[in-house]
Image (tube, rainbow, N blue to C red):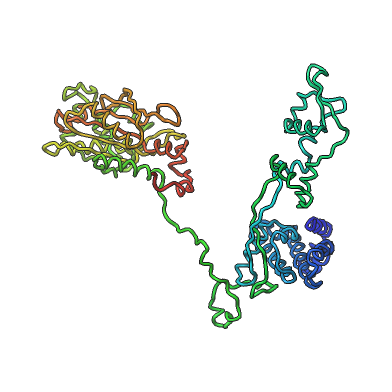
Amino acid sequence: MVFLQSHINIRTLKPKFEERFYGNKTWAIETTGVAFLTLKTFEYLQYFPECSDVTIVSVLRIEAEFAVTFTVLMAFNAVDHNGPDAEDAKSENLGERILLLLNCKEPLDTIELASELRVSHQVIVGAVKSLEARGNLIKTEQVSNKHLELTEEGKQIAIHGSHEAVLWRHVSDEGIPLSKLMTLPNAKIGFSKAMSVGWIKVDKKAGPEPIVYRKVDEIDDAVQRTLNLFSKMELDGISDQTKADLKKRKLIHEISQTTFRLSRGADFSTTLDKPETDLTAELLINDAWQKKQFKPYNFKALGAPPTRGYLHPLLQVRAEFRQIFLEMGFSEMPTNNYVESSFWNFDALFQPQQHPARDAQDTFFVSDPATQCEFPEEYLQRVKMVHSGGAFGSKGYQYDWKLEDARKNILRTHTTATSAKMLYKLAQEKPFKPAKYFSIDRVFRNETLDATHLAEFHQIEGVVAGVDLSLGHLIGVLHEFFHKLGLTQLRFKPAYNPYTEPSMEIFSYHPMLKKWVEVGNSGMFRPEVLLPMGLPENVSVIAWGLSLERPTMIKYGIDNIRDLFGPRVDLGMVASSPICHF
C-alpha cells in the first residue's frame, strides 16, 4: 500500500520531478512522503510504544526516504530495481531500521519484525546476518519453533470456500443430476462431506438417474471460517480436535521454522558505518586506519573453487577401453599420423582403386602435400601384382593399378592403415613372433553431419596375429573383450569387408532399449593383405573395431553426437561428469 501510494504520487507529479527532483532531493522526499509517513506512524506507535517520538520519526525518515527516492529513481530508469546496487540499498536500509527499533525494544523476534516491516522472514534473516558480520553490533539467539500453516489446498478453500460449500452452491432449488454434479473439481470429497453434515439429499427415484437437492436454505462454512483464522494467525479459539480434522484433510500442515531473537551487542550503534575491507597505502600514510573499523576475516567462508581441468567423457571412456586392452596383453600402436597415403589406407588393405570409398564424396584429400613418394619398393610391387593380375592363389581385381592413385595423401578414413604398417613391420622380423596390437584414435570421413554422424570421430581397433588362428579364436577374444565392458550377451552376423574374410558384425543386447544393437565389426584379414607383406602362410590375423562415440553416448545418455564432440559441447556437462565409475 505504501509503495502503491508512492507510485501514484510520482505519476501525478512526474512533470515537476523532471524539472526539480535532481536539484532538490529534499523537496521530492517531503512532497511524496506525506502519505507514507501518515500511514506508517500509527503502525509503529502501536507496535513500539516504548519508542520515543524522535526514534519513530528517524525510522520513518529512513524508510520514507528510501521508498520514495528509490521509487522515483525507478520511474526515471535511474536504477535497476532488481540490480545488485538496489539489493545493497535495500539491505542497508533494512539493517538501519532494525537497529533503531532494537534501540527502544529488546529483545526483538525476527518473525515479529517480518510481520511489522512487511517483508519476508528470509529477507529479515539476511539483514540480521549482515549485521552479525559487522562484529558485536547485535547478539542473536537461534530459536526453533513449530507452527501450523495452510497448505495450497487450504489457501484455495480460505478464498473460495470448502469443497462441500462449493458443491452445495451448485445445487439449485430444482435439483441437479448427480452425474452432472460429480463433474465438479473435488466433487467426491465435497459430496461426502455435504451429505455427512446434512446440507444435501439424494432422490434416487426422481428420474432415470439420481437427483441431488438442497436440504437446508443456508449454510455456515465453518471450514473456510477456521482456515481464515489460520491465515490471520488467530488460533486461540480453534480446538485441538478441529486442528486434527484439518490436518487429516491436508488443509493445514505443521512447519518447523528457525527464527532469531535479537538483542543489543557490546558495540551496539543505531548507525551503520561501512567497515573497511582492505588496509590501503593511503590509510597507512595518514594514520587514518586507527579511526577506521575493519571487516573481520571470515575463515569459515567458502573460497572460490579452484580453476582446474576436467576429463571429457570421451577421454574417460577411452581410458577405460585402453585399460581393458592392456589387461589383455595388447600393445598400443603409434597412431599420430592423421595424414596417410592412399597406399597404406586402401591399397595395402586390398581395397581396389575404383572402390566408392576412395571417392571425394567419402574421403578428404590433402592438397599440400598432395602426394607421398616413399614406400617399400618390393612390397609396393607385390601389392600392385595382387590388385592387377592376382597372386598368392588369388585372381585379384584384374584392373590397371596406378601408382599415382596410391601416392595421393588423404586424412585417414580408419586406423586400420596403422594396423597394416604394424603387420608389415612384424613380417620383416624373423622368426615370426605372435603379436597383439590396439589403437584408439581419430579418423575422418567426408560424411553428412547429423545426430549420429560426424566427419571426425574415434575408432577403437584390436588386432591379433598368430599361427593357425580361426574364427573361433576371434569369437572367443570378442567375448572376453566385451565381457570386460559389461556386455555379456553377444550375437554375430555375416558381413562384407574388402580386407577381411570371413567378416562379422557384432551385436549386443541393450537392456534399456530392450533390443539388439550393433556394437562393432570384425573379421580375419584376407591372404591378399597378409602374404604380400611377407607373413608366413600359416599366420592368421584376427581384428575388430568399433567407434568410441557410440558406447560413450549410451553410457552418458546422450542422443546427439554433436553434443558430445565438437563446438556444441556443453562445458558444464564436461565439468560435472564423474572422474571414475565403480
Image position of 251 with respect to 185: above or below: below
* Residue 205 picture quarter: top right
In the picture provided, is 347 more to the left or to the right than 546? Answer: left
In the picture provided, is 352 more to the left or to the right than 112? Answer: left
Image position of 467 with respect to 565: above or below: above
Query: Which residue sits at x=17%, y=24%?
Result: 391
Q: Where residue 151 appears, x then y in whole percent?
A: 69, 44
Q: Where residue 325 appears, x then y in whole percent?
A: 28, 40
The reply to whether residue 532 is in sight is yes
Spot the residue most to the left: 431
Query: Which residue sits at x=41%, y=44%?
Result: 313
* Residue 506 picture quarter: top left
In the picture provided, is 142 more to the left or to the right than 453? Answer: right
Query: Which residue sits at x=80%, y=36%?
Result: 165
Spot the residue most to the top: 208
Q: Where residue 94 appears, x then y in whole percent?
A: 70, 64
Q: How many marks?
A: 0
In the picture provided, is 307 more to the left or to the right than 489? Answer: right
Quarter of the image where the N terminus is located: bottom right
